[in-house]
Image (cartoon, grey):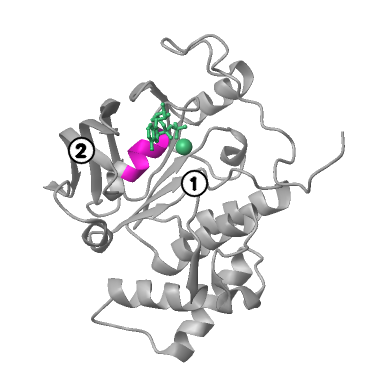
Amino acid sequence: MRGMADTLEIIDLHAGIEGKEILKGVSLTVRTGEIHAVMGPNGSGKSTLAYTLMGHPKYKFISGDIRINGESIVGLPPNQRALKGLFLGFQYPLEIPGVSLANFLRISYNSLRKDEPMLVRDFRKLLEDKFELVGMERSFATRYLNEGFSGGEKKKAEVVQLAVLRPKFAILDETDSGLDIDALKLVSDGINSVHGPDRGIVLITHYQRILRYVTPDFVHVMVDGRVALSGGAELAQKLEEKGYGWIKGVEEGGGELRQPSMPDAPEQNH
Ligand code: ADP
Ligand code: MG
């Protein structure tokens, strides 16, 4: 038996962008210690859910609630949501010229742990460990955040950030997309290394592939802004075999699920 888990509750959440309602009543409860996979066809609202949870200003909350340990966070800006333990790994990580990856991580880390800031020297050691975890060279530490990083390197940098910050609840939006098989394994190792009783992980993914390395406790399928179906890890297996087309509400042809074998490989001549 473990103690009381922390909870992230998404309650009948409606939200939208550009005046259009995208999330049409999403309900989901994540407890620390659990891994939830959120799957679904392109355009079903997965990234909108991620951004809305984090409080991105472009995404408008309409109704429902988002609660951490029973307390609503919908009125809070992103940095205060981070202080409550929420983290978002972006599907398309931003490039920030002028800020090195190491400085970005140290500033983020210290802003979340104001009472126990880490010395530069200690932080460097911590970073080295995390870089090693995902197979990134140390030289990335002094490079500007994501600038000129390949798709795979950006995703690894998100996992480094996750492993350094160790948030209570991590929302990872397609952290697996565009990775070749070796990078996918390293990214999975990174995610598994932060998994534990003190963390809840929401793994947003279009493909079943990463779920061979990171085993979810729950799998949810989003269709048209709602959770259409939930199950255990076996649901991901069924999706691998049958695609999304059989789920009620999924349009014909909208269920393609097979991953191209090496999407991030160098351009090839056909
Ligand atoms: P997913 O991540 O599941 O592929 P998204 O949340 O990115 O889905 O998109 C859900 C819907 O919201 C799509 O129909 C998409 O076109 C729409 N959408 C997303 N971003 C914008 C935007 N900036 N402006 C208008 N519509 C958007
Ligand atoms: Mg998306």
- Which residue lies under the disc numbered 2? 61
Report the side of 184 relative to 67 (left or right). right
Marks 1,2: beta carbons within 8 A: no
Q: Quadrant of the C terminus?
A: top right
Measured as percent of width and height from the top left, residue 268 is found at: 83, 42
- Which residue lies under the disc numbered 1? 91
Question: Element at badge 1?
Answer: loop
On screen, 144 above or below 190?
A: below
- Mark 1 Cβ and ligand 2 under 8 Å apart: yes
Is 50 covered by the magenta stretch?
yes
Q: Who's the residue at 56% across and 55% down the image? A: 155
Measured as percent of width and height from the top left, residue 110 is found at: 33, 78
From this viewpoint, which residue is outermost toward the front?
18
Please identify the quarter of the rendering in which residue 107 is found: bottom left
Please identify the quarter of the rendering in which residue 46 is found: top left
Identify the amino acid type marked 1: Gln
